[in-house]
Image: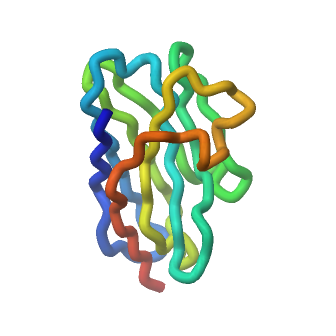
Amino acid sequence: VQLQASGGGLVQAGDSRRLSCIATARSFNIYTVAWFRQAPGKGRESLAASRYGTSATYYSDSVKGRFTISRDNAKNTVYLQMDSLQPEDTAVYYCAGANFLHDDYYNTERYYNFWGQGTQVTVSS
């Protein structure tokens, strides 16, 4: 499985941006797909995940209410809609996939075995 993240760029504080993660996979529906980010000098942070099968969504407290994850299985694509962006959202954003991932591990980096290359989001004040 290969993942490709896109949609990053330079935005101003308060703007919105939608990231896309396209997967090359025969059975995309079996993969939980998540978004992580890594800011300069910091570790990778879990943001949101879309569960395999049910497409249930999970969010970290830091983005709940501002970010929305969604998926289109027909297009093998998962989206991350980001609203009210702030300078502290500046980071490289990664999508990651894992097949049949247990719900308890949706936000645990080491359980994801497929990663996209990352897309830079820079929010200016």
Q: Give x and y (percent) for residue 87.
A: 52, 78
To which quarter of the image does residue 79 belong? top left
Q: Residue at x 25, y 25 (%)?
A: 75
Residue 34, compared with residue 45, is above or below; it is: above
Q: Residue at x 53, y 31 (%)?
A: 50
Q: Give x and y (percent) for residue 64.
A: 66, 49
Residue 102, compared with residue 84, is above or below; it is: above
Q: Residue at x 52, y 14 (%)?
A: 53
To which quarter of the image does residue 117 belong? bottom left
Q: Residue at x 42, y 83 (%)?
A: 124
- Count of numbered tags: 0
Quadrant for the N terminus in the image? top left
Q: Give x and y (percent) for residue 44.
A: 58, 63
Residue 104, compared with residue 6, is above or below; it is: above
Question: Toward the viewer: 13 or 98?
Answer: 98
96 vs 74, left or right, is: right
Q: Give x and y (percent) for residue 32.
A: 51, 29
4 vs 44, left or right, is: left
Q: How is the image coloured?
A: rainbow
